[in-house]
Amino acid sequence: MNQAHQTHQTALVTGAYRGIGRELTRQLAARGWRVVAVHRRPADPAGGPLRALGALELPEVDVRRPAGLLAAVRALGVERLDLLINNAGVFLNEALGAIDYDDVLTQLEVNAVAPLRVTEELLPLLGAGSKVVQVTSRMGSIADNTSGAYYGYRMSKAALNAASASLALDLRPRGVAVALVHPGFVRTEMTGGRGLIEPEESARGILARADALTLAESGGFWHVDGSRLPW
Ligand SMILES: NC(=O)c1ccc[n+]([C@@H]2O[C@H](COP(=O)([O-])OP(=O)(O)OC[C@H]3O[C@@H](n4cnc5c(N)ncnc54)[C@H](OP(=O)(O)O)[C@@H]3O)[C@@H](O)[C@H]2O)c1
C-alpha cells in the first residue's frame, strides 16, 4: 500500500465554490484527501473548477436547507468524514438607524443555524477521530468587540460559537472534536478584496488548526494563527 493510499482521508467543505472554501478544497485535494466540495451553484455538466481540483462536487446545495445532503454524500461512496468544514457564510453590513432585519435574520440563518443543521444532517458520517471545523469570526467575540456595528454578523457568529460549544460537549462521547476558527482578515469577495492575508494563507492556517485539534481541546475558539480568542 502506498503512502497516499494509507493516509486517504475524506473531508467535506461547504461554500466551496469561491473564497476560503475554494482554497480549502484545493489544499485538501493537493494533500491527497478525498474532498466533497459543496456549493449552491448550478451543476456544470462539463465539470466545473472544483472537479478540476480533483474534488467530488455537490452542487445546488443551499446550506440553509441541507435535507438530502447525507444521501447525496453517501451516493458519492462516502461513509465517513474525517473532517467537516462549515465554511459557507454571508456578511451583510448594517449601520444603526438603518438596520435591515431581513439581513439580520439571513445572517443568523446562514452563519449560525445552517452549520448546526449541516452538522446534524451529517452526524451518521462522523465517528471516533472525526473533526468539525466551524469557520467563525472574531467579530462573534463579545469580549473582543471594541468597534461596535455589524449587528447581524456579530450576532450570527456569536450564535455559531454558542452552538458549537454545545456540539463539542455533545459529540465528545462519540470521539468527535470541534474547533471554532477565525480565518483572519482575508482578501475575498466578502471583504471586497480587502484584508491582511490571501485565502491561500488562511486555508493553510485553518487546516493546521484542524491537524492540531484534539478531543481534549474540543470546543476551543482559535485565531487562524493558533492563538486563542476570548469569547
Ligand atoms: N474574509 C474574511 O476576512 C473573513 C473573516 C472572518 C470570517 N470569515 C468567514 O469565512 C467564511 C468564508 O468567507 P469568504 O471570505 O471565503 O467569503 P466569500 O468569498 O464571500 O465566500 C462565501 C461562500 O459562502 C457561500 N454561501 C453563502 N451563503 C450560502 C448558502 N446559503 N448556501 C450555500 N453556500 C453559501 C458562497 O456561495 P456563493 O458563491 O454561491 O455565493 C461562497 O462560496 C465565512 O463563514 C465568513 O464569515 C471571513
Image (cartoon, rainbow, N blue to C red):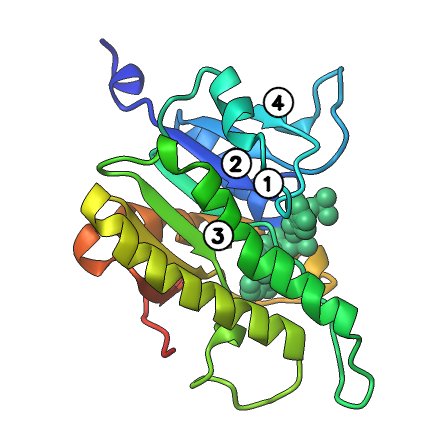
Q: Which mark is residue 51?
A: 4
Q: The residue tagged with tag 2: helix, strand or loop? A: helix
Residue count near mark 1 (Cα–Cα under 10 Å), binned few <14, some 14–19, many ≥20:
many
Residue drawn at x 30%, y 56% as measured from the top left: 168
Q: Position of residue 3 (x, y in %)?
A: 25, 18
Left/right placement of residue 41 relative to residue 224 reads right
Q: Please give the residue where the numbered disc 1 appears in the rendered image.
A: 22
Does the rendering let one see residue 192? yes
Q: The residue tagged with tag 4: helix, strand or loop? A: helix
Q: Gap in Å between the C-alphas at discs 4 and 2?
A: 10 Å
If you read the primary sequence from the N terminus, does the residue marked by circle 2 or circle 3 appear first? 2
If you read the primary sequence from the N terminus, does the residue marked by circle 1 or circle 3 appear first? 1
Q: Please give the residue where the numbered disc 3 appears in the rendered image.
A: 116
Q: Please give the residue where the numbered disc 2 appears in the rendered image.
A: 25
- Outermost top residue: 1
Residue drawn at x 55%, y 57% as measured from the top left: 113
Q: Gap in Å between the C-alphas at discs 2 and 3?
A: 21 Å
If you read the primary sequence from the N terminus, does the residue marked by circle 4 or circle 2 appear first? 2
Q: Position of residue 1 (x, y in %)?
A: 22, 9
